[in-house]
Image: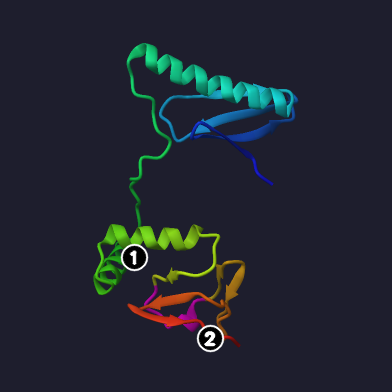
Amino acid sequence: MNSMLEYKGYHAKIEFDAEDMIFVGEVFGVRDSLNFHGRSIDELTAMFHQTIDNYLELCAELGRQPDKEFKGSFNVRIAPALHRQAALKAEQGHMTLNQYVEKAIESAVSETKGGEVYILSDRPLKAVSQKWTDGEILRSDSCYQAPGRQYRLRGELFDAKPC
């Protein structure tokens, strides 16, 4: 099920208000508050499009650059020990911390098979309890099922072995 709408590069989260019997949408990723609602899916979609069109039109009238949903940079707050681990792993992999984090996020959100999975752990891989990868579980025993995937642990790249 998808509870999001997309239009002109903007996305909105949709919820149902049972009290008022309407669908309510909120555009996310922009500083301005952009909200809309509708009693049907068609009305909700039309109101979302109108909201975005009005927003872009108003920005043009004011001579203001409209917010972009994602700018490609964000701050992440993590434990200092994890920060240190990631920086060391990046250095071992001959890449910047930003490149390492980008690859880790790509791996985590990828819906395609193949490529590398970056695991931030100094523990032996079999101690990692469970990690979902392409719908398959990386198990806590020594049985690692994920054909076509490679795993990086302590800077070493290895292929997953079938059970």
Q: In which quarter of the image is the C terminus?
A: bottom right
**Residue 40 percent across, percent down from the top left:** 74, 26
Disc 1, SS:
helix
Magenta stretch holds residue 122 = yes
Point out the frontmost of discs 2 and 1: 2
Q: Determine the CA span between mark 2 and mark 1.
A: 28 Å
Q: In this view, does 45 lie to the left or right of 146?
A: right
For mark 2, what is the residue? 161
Q: In which quarter of the image is residue 97?
A: bottom left
Q: Where is residue 152 in the image (x, y as percent from the top left)?
A: 40, 76
Three-letter residue code for mark 2: Lys
Q: Hey, what amino acid is under mark 1?
A: Leu
Frontmost residue, 66 versus 89: 66
Quick check: 117 left or right of 19? left
Q: Which of marks 2 and 1 is nearer the N terminus?
A: 1
**Local secondary structure at mark 2:** loop
Q: In terms of secondary structure, what is the magenta stretch mainly?
A: loop
Q: Which of 12 and 149 is in front in this view?
A: 149
Residue 123 lies in quadrant: bottom left
Which circle marks residue 82 in the picture? 1
Residue at 31%, 66% in the rendered image: 86
Q: Residue 116's x, y, as percent?
A: 44, 70
Instruction: Let me know if residue 102 is in the magenta part.
Output: no
- Give the extent of the magenta segment: 121-128
Vertical position of residue 119 compared to residue 6: above or below: below
